[in-house]
Amino acid sequence: MIEAARSTLLAQMSVKDLPGHAGTATASVGRRSALFVWATADGRFCSGAAGADGGYTVSTCTSSPGDTAFSSRPGLVPLVTIAAIGTSQNLVIGADRETVRSVTCNGTPLTFRRLKGVLDHRRALYAFDLPGQTGGSVTVTAVRAHTAAKEHVNLLWKRHAGRPMCH
């Protein structure tokens, strides 16, 4: 299913937006679709999702490599937040000069995955999923220079009546 979704997505991409030498990293997998991230040959960051059956594709790429410039200081960089029609919210964050140790919603640990390097060694990419329309922000604990730091990543929705919230 993942390879079918990847093939569907890449078949719809312009040549300039195709993945560079590192290829794509799979950020999230649904029942019939997958979310991918990659860097183009000229260093621009891209993300895209596709249905394995060819039913849909969506993708976006930055205009220049500088649009996702690396920080000289430790910190998180939200890179992708996408919602899959009310069922899930898929996020990809970059960690500059730090390593993510946990992601929590109201103190409850979330499963997160470190993605293979698609940019370079300065930024690690991490992906995690939440139920659709969860609002607020998640808490990310990261280690930088042997010290733990807590940071927050905003979700798509600030507040949503009757939906789960992270604080």
Image (cartoon, rainbow, N blue to C red):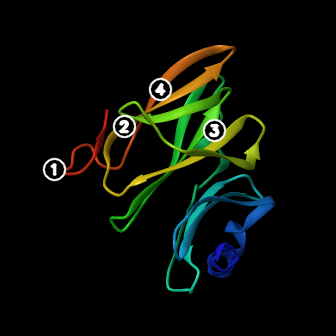
Question: Which residue type does callout 3 highlight?
Answer: Ala
Q: Position of residue 8 (x, y in %)?
A: 63, 81
Residue at 63% x, 21% y: name it.
143
Q: Residue 158: x, y in percent?
A: 26, 43
Q: Which residue is mark 3?
A: 69
- Reading the image, the residue beneath label 2 is 137
Dot placed on the residue nearer the N-terminal end, 3 or 4 = 3
Instruction: Work out how far the residue at label 1 is from the one at label 4, CA to CA, in angstroms.
Output: 25 Å
Res 46 seen here: yes
Measure the alpha-carbon separation of dots 3 and 4.
Answer: 19 Å
Q: Does residue 73 appear in this view?
A: no
The mark lying in front, picked from 3 and 4, is 4
Of the numbered discs in the image, which one, if any, rests on residue 161?
Answer: 1
The residue positioned 65% from the left and 31% from the top of the image is 96
How many other residues sit within 10 Å of disc 2, few (<14), some (14-19) or many (≥20)? many
- Reading the image, the residue beneath label 4 is 151
Against 58, is 152 above or below? above
Could you tell me which secondary element the residue under label 4 belongs to? strand
Image marks 1 and 4: residues in contact by CB distance under 8 Å:
no
